[in-house]
Image (cartoon, rainbow, N blue to C red):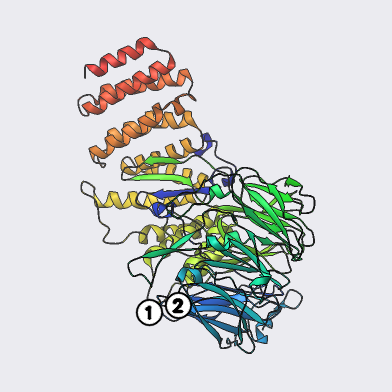
Amino acid sequence: MSNSHRHLPDSPRTLAELAVVLLALSVFAACVPNGTVRWEEDRTIPFSADDRAIAYRHKDSVFVARTRGDMHRRVFTAKPDTTLSSPHWAPGQRAVLFAVTDGKRDSSTGLLSYALWYWPAPEDIWTSDVQKSAGDSATLPSDWTPANPRFLTAARFRAEIQLKADALFAWHPDGNHVLFLDTDASGLQSVMSLNADNGMRTVASPIRAPSLAFSISPNGEWLTSATRKSDMGALWLGPIGSDETKWRSIEKSPAPPVVPEHRVEDAQHRGHSEFLYDLRPRLGSWSPDSRWLAHIRAPAAAQPADSSQPADSNPIRELVLTRIATDRPQRVLSMPEGQTTDLHWAPGERLLGMLSEKRLLLVDPESGTLTELSGALQVEQFLGWSKPGSNLAYLTLAEEFDRTVAIVPHGRIRWAPAQRHNLMVAQPNGTLPSRRFGLMNISSARWGNQSTKLSFWATHLPTVSHLPPGDPAAVLDLDEDAIRWYPTDVAEYAQVGNYYLLNREYADAVKFYTDALTHVPDGDEDRTLVARIRLWRGMSRLAAGEAVAARKDLEYFRGHILAPDLQVPDGWDAAVFRALSIDQIFLSTLLSMGQISLAVEEATRIIEQDRDARLIQGLCYLAMIDRATGQHELFTDGVVTRLVPHAMRSEQIPRESAEMLVAAYLRDALHPSNQRYLSARTKKRLADKLVELAQSMQDTHPQAAVRLSESAAVFYRESGKTALEMDALRTSAGM
């Protein structure tokens, strides 16, 4: 059947923004959350104070890059068997701080040690061989070499996840001091302060607890500490460096009531263990002027007595607004039902935004007025306002569609939504939202310090083609409407190509796929990966009308995608099985990249060229597409008049596999969710076809003939032809 008979989406965004096709035995199972509460690894990409550079941790190294270029440089590489934290730019300085641990525990205390390293960025990182964009650099100098990092201090901590999650240290706003967690021999954590110039250490807070988190006010005067120690309270506030008389408990029950936990061994009692809690979600959010602290309160009933007792998952929560440096009572506002997260203050205004049940809410702390921000629907994450206050940003999921599972001659295909996002940018009041980036999984997004730039990691996730892990760093400049990428290897260049292919920017897709191929290590060519990149590039060229170049890429893909020693299942001809496997990868990848029309064209081409197994698999793909796009008459007609007859007569597909395939598609065709969309005339016509086919199969496939007659009876019944239904049932009983 030609493509012209199908009503395909004008754009992949109406259906396939989230499309992902997963082969049987694919990586999908590994992507499904298992329900375990875990600490979240921090991978934010911080900007320098002037937003002209970024620094980030990636693959056990620290990189720096210009935000107006696409070149990055490695400034530190961790030794084998060590763990590296995310880097932090110093406020007002061109320097980066990061932590490293060797993961070795002290034999007596069971504690780990970590070292803080200070990397001074040399001035030539801000100059370039090539000047662009009104004097701002596009690349780092070709002869530039990084300065050596300087050791600052060492401290102890309880679990490696604290370092990965960026829960151990933070710059003081003065840019000269670092606050960090240290742990004593008894396992109690406390906040210390370090002078980065002379190395002097002082106590920043008198609060000590087995689990501790802290945050610094923007003006650098105040500190909040969240603890798990019930006899001390849960959220404390006090001036940095003051004694306990200046500190006060401002909350007994901060939310969320359950926070990510990590089991650690208690060195004092061998064989026992305890939980280390990530308490940062309870710290709340400081207003830019440091006059207010906002946090969420959960009723005491929602607090589990210990980790074995589940908390109330949906208690009534309150927003608590604390005035700093005053004795005035806290302002307490009841919140809508459900979790409240992502608290962000608007710069220059005393307004607080937050996410509640996928809605954006706005609070005026002075009046207590709570309003819903207009224009923001089904928000997955609220990123807050840009520092100039000219925009706010949030993430949404691209349009959902129903999951479709289809049987193919060998295995099954699963077409289902993936965790891909749209990055939406709106006016400060939430109006005029527009999509500025999309169709990729976006993580660790954050605003720049001065500008309307956003940094994040972007991943095509998941993918049928089993692309090795690779999520390149990116910076989106809203003012210039430009995206800068920082890929580090062949897989990440290919990921960028996937972004442009998904967004139908084919010339850029071809460029990055070509760049990916140039980064394949010499002498260590991954045959399968190269073949897949050639497939993606060929798809891009085909969509762009470059037929000759596309043909070369696709021929390479077909000749190299499968290993020469591919294991062939019993009952299959090797050549047939290899051809089916190649077609399956090709068609699945077309769908996963949103190229639905091309998938239909390729499946149709295969059907026209073959008369057995490849034809049948092509029909399976067309059936899956028709079903997913809601074309029920086309789906059912294709199953009954083409797919089932060909499968029953196949000489290349093992009989058991063919009959299982027929049973699966008839079951889908007969399901009420499909039948209700068919006209009575169509049901009668298809029932007649099934009766005719059953009679022809009675001698060669008796069991299948019975199933066909029974299916015909259902079609007759649904069409209102009761007499014909009874005839079909009698025929079935007599077979």
* Element under disc 2: loop
**Distance Cα–Cα, label 1 vs label 2:** 9 Å
Position of 408 with respect to 432 (left or right) is: left
Question: Disc 1 marks which residue?
Answer: 108
Which residue ends up furthest to the top in the rendered image?
Answer: 723
Q: Quadrant of the C terminus?
A: top left
Mark 2, Cα crowd under 10 Å, few <14 / some 14-19 / many 20+, is: some
Task: Classify mark 1: residues with Cα within 10 Å, few (<14), some (14-19) or many (20+).
Answer: few
Is 401 or 268 nearer to us in this picture? Answer: 268
Picture layout, residue 585 above or below residue 617: below
Q: Nearer the viewer, residue 639 or 496?
A: 496
Q: Amino acid at mark 2?
A: Ala
x, y percent for residue 10: 60, 42
Left or right: where 446 falls relative to 466: right
Q: In the rendered picture of this protein, how many numbered marks are placed on residues?
A: 2
Does residue 436 appear anywhere in the picture? no
Query: Is residue 521 visible to the viewer in this orientation of the structure?
Result: yes
Image x and y of residue 474, in percent: 60, 66
Residue wearing tag 2? 185
> Would residue 18 be found to the left or right of residue 223 on screen?
left
Q: Is residue 511 above or below residue 3?
A: below
What amino acid type is highlighted by mark number 1? Ser
Q: Which residue in the rendered view is the most extreme toward the bottom?
A: 198
